[in-house]
Amino acid sequence: MKDIITLAIESSCDETSAAVLKNGREVLANIVATQIDLHKKFGGVVPEVASRKHVENIDAVIQTALDEADIKFDDIDLIGVTYGPGLVGALLVGLSTAKALSFALNKPLVGVNHIEGHICANFIEDKNLEPPFICLIVSGGHTHLVEVKDYGEYEILGRTRDDAAGEAFDKIARALKLGYPGGPIIDKLAKIGNKNAIDFPRVYLDEDSFDFSFSGLKSAVLNYLNSKRMRNEDVVVEDIAASFQEAVVEVLVNKSIKAAKVKGYNKIVLAGGVAANSGLREKLIQKCSENNITVKYPSIELCTDNAAMIGCAAYYDYIKGKISNLTLNAVPNLKLGQK
Ligand code: KG4
Ligand code: ZN
């Protein structure tokens, strides 16, 4: 059978990325131009600045991916692109480029949900991984507990009711004046801090709910900081980082294990930027082994935003005949499972 070559484009937030994949799971190139340094001085992503930088970067990023994969435009079978969720201006850069290429080259276009892309990063990481499984998707914009029934078939069991897990990491890091993005910095500090130093709240919501809430924890950390400052007392940043991370991780892990048990699965898969967190990985591995559950997670490069994961999701849609047309628009608040 002829190999299927996917060109994938991702520009939903602050990474301009293009990838080339063979048969959906083999990455021939995955180029990521990150804008983190540009947004750092503002303490977060500035949407308009992100869009402009995507426009500057996108052509070169695509050309570099094709060159690295040793692929010409003619060799491409489909073009996969993120069309939501994300920042509308940023999404439109990747989407318009993909539509132009699809039209000019006469190749099919496949619009991909960014969250679905994060799940699919695991299919690239582990070539033998097959659905069904429970997936915990934790990123800067999303916290979802999902039953992955088949390729492209999802049931959302729970989601955050307020802040996403990554957002909580970023906000706490900002309050501690640690810089952006906060997740990796807190992760690093947590390694040398005492996770039992401060008893921050674990918010489980209702007994049967798989939803999450991190705003109460965020307020608790901010209140702790304010009261220390008001009394002119020193704080141990490493202990705050470790105690905060532990409170987030404990809830994420316990809810994931419960979802696997309730739904009768013995496999949990991690996805999204926060899946890079070493405390989360460690605790999930430990709790899963106690419960005879297998754990899978992508390598760090595949956890954070990249086009390879989008290409994998596009491939599975393509072989099922799910093709988009050129009227496809960016959908900033696109939900998982919604086409
Ligand atoms: O998936 P991603 O690259 O972008 C979104 O789709 O949102 O995730 C970015 C998020 C940021 O909030 C960042 O702080 C967080 O992932 N993150 C981490 C770590 N690495 C990235 N959070 C905790 N620990 C990490 N090691
Ligand atoms: Zn993402």
Image: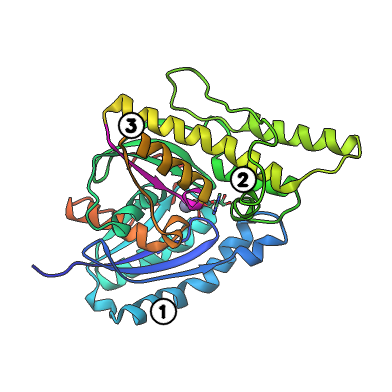
| Number of numbered discs | 3
Q: Secondary structure at mark 2?
A: helix
Q: Is residue 2 left or right of residue 77?
A: left
Relative image position of residue 153 (x, y in whole percent): 26, 40
Q: SS for tag 3?
A: helix
Instruction: Note whether ligand 1 is within 8 Å of mark 2.
Output: yes
Q: Is residue 113 left or right of residue 39?
A: left
Among numbered discs 2 and 3, the one appearing first in the sequence = 2
- Closer to the camera: disc 1 or disc 3? 3
Query: N-terminal of the two: label 1 or label 2?
Result: 1
Q: CA distance from mark 1 to mark 2?
A: 33 Å
Which residue does the image show at 29% across and 82% down from the upper left? 70
Judge whether residue 273 is colored magenta. yes
Nearest to viewer (mark 2 / mark 3): 3
Give the residue number, with chain letter if any, for mark 2.
169
Amino acid at pointer 1: Thr
Residue 227 belongs to the span the image colors magenta:
no
Crowd around label 2: few <14 · some 14–19 · many ≥20 (10 Å): many
Q: Quadrant of the N terminus?
A: bottom left
Residue 66 picture location, percent across and down: 34, 78
Residues under labels 2 and 3: Cα distance?
A: 25 Å
The numbered dot on residue 260 is 3
Q: How is the image coloured?
A: rainbow
Q: Which residue is mark 1?
A: 64
Q: Which residues fall within the magenta stretch?
A: 265-276
Q: Is residue 197 above or below residue 281?
A: above
Rendered residue at 56%/45% (across/down):
166
